[in-house]
Image (spheres, coloured by chain):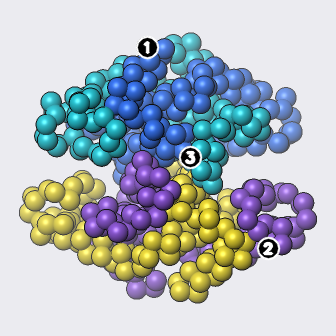
Chain colours: A yellow, B purple, C blue, D cyan
Amino acid sequence: MERLTAEIRAFAEERDWQQFHTPKNLTMALAGEVGELLAEFQWLTPEQSAEVMSDPEAGARVKAEIGDVMIYLTRLADVLGVDLVEVALMKLAEAAGRYPVAEARGSAEKRRATDNRGVAGS
Amino acid sequence: MERLTAEIRAFAEERDWQQFHTPKNLTMALAGEVGELLAEFQWLTPEQSAEVMSDPEAGARVKAEIGDVMIYLTRLADVLGVDLVEVALMKLAEAAGRYPVAEARGSAEKRRATDNRGVAGS
Amino acid sequence: MERLTAEIRAFAEERDWQQFHTPKNLTMALAGEVGELLAEFQWLTPEQSAEVMSDPEAGARVKAEIGDVMIYLTRLADVLGVDLVEVALMKLAEAAGRYPVAEARGSAEKRRATDNRGVAGS
Amino acid sequence: MERLTAEIRAFAEERDWQQFHTPKNLTMALAGEVGELLAEFQWLTPEQSAEVMSDPEAGARVKAEIGDVMIYLTRLADVLGVDLVEVALMKLAEAAGRYPVAEARGSAEKRRATDNRGVAGS
């Protein structure tokens, strides 16, 4: 991850693009790329979506879109001084408290962070 | 990254949530979280967005949303068998070819992948 | 539609919010609300999504999110001087040319605007 | 609006595409198109975004993307049996209560629906 972060930073600096890389713009760019990723799956059934990587063309497009999403997310995190893996692990731990295994097993029912029904809290 | 991927996979399996984690659903969840991230910046000026981390409350919300985005992106990549850092580096290399430093410096003008104006191609 | 456009404009002007309603910001706000709408469907199967309006709570949330999306889309169109219904009819006519009934029936295969395979063009 | 709704419905039925038009898929398609709209503004300053319609090419792309967003939003509302203008007016009225003119004037500070600070409630 540190290599990717450094290479994206160098890519931007070499082209004098830091001026465009405000968090506001990077978040929009990230959302734009996620939109392209969504478009790859929008007409597929859930089952077809699980097989998408077996189709060479569709699979290549999905990989490309995921690559673009990761580039902008990494750049956004770098510009904001946020450690991607660290904040993800932090939120995962929170979710583990909010959805204890015994209660959450098999259910997609959402528990909002302010919901105290039987969980350790957020 | 491998640790994060493994922990998210374990989190999902312990709760029998793999059934919900089709690529179609995970892409929607990713987009939903990116939407929450966008909302943190939507009314800020670009300058305000660059200072968002100095505000304890806004900064905490931004970190939380980035964490959620990273969780779903990592899980989606895992389910699809895609290496996040690898595809990002691949796309970055493509972009370096499409936007050579000498030509791209300072300009945000987009070059589409099929555009051969003075670039090495995608 | 004209009434809605006028009421949203009045709502923004009464609160001196035009300053925040740049097309850039409005597009971000629109995307943020679409993210909330996605979240209502992300774990549902396609069949469950078709029944969402039968659940009073989920149905109410879906209506609320659609309302917010329509508000920002209408405001964005107003600020840009775009007629929503007119541009939609225009794009629909284009799509009708790109996907003639005889060829497109039953297939979700995408035809890009630059694709001339048997269609009248975009 | 009724004409647009009817024409989109006919367009889908003639091509036997109702099978693809589950609310889940339509919401993803809507989000994908909003992503394309975001991409038109992502590198622009707020001021440049306000002038986008003066650029013939950029303006045409923005109109096209807005058209696509409106098509999918209208189709989603039709499939769910939701009246777009009605739910937008409903949410606008709610927002008027949550952000009374005297208190909200000039400020973008968000008030969550469950927040009772000086407002009539949501």
Q: Is residue C98 left or right of residue D49?
A: right
Q: For the residues tagged 1 and 2, is the chain the same? A: no
Badge 1, how many Cα within 10 Å: few under 14, some, many 20+? few
Query: Quarter-wise, where is residue B13 in the image?
Result: bottom left
Q: Nearer the viewer, residue B93 or C118?
A: B93
Q: Residue tagged by mark 1? A: C3
Query: Quarter-wise, where is residue C71 in the image?
Result: top left
Q: Residue tagged by mark 2? A: B101
Chain of the residue that carries numbered disc 1 in the rendered image: C
Q: Residue tagged by mark 3? A: D46
**C-alpha distance separating marks 3 and 1:** 27 Å
Chain of the residue that carries numbered disc 3 in the rendered image: D
Rendered position, D114 above or below D63: below
Kind of residue at disc 1: Arg
Element carrying mark 3: helix
Q: Nearer the viewer, residue C102 or D100?
A: D100
Q: Is residue C19 left or right of residue A96?
A: right
In percent of width and height, residue B118 lies at 91, 65
Badge 2, how many Cα within 10 Å: few under 14, some, many 20+? some
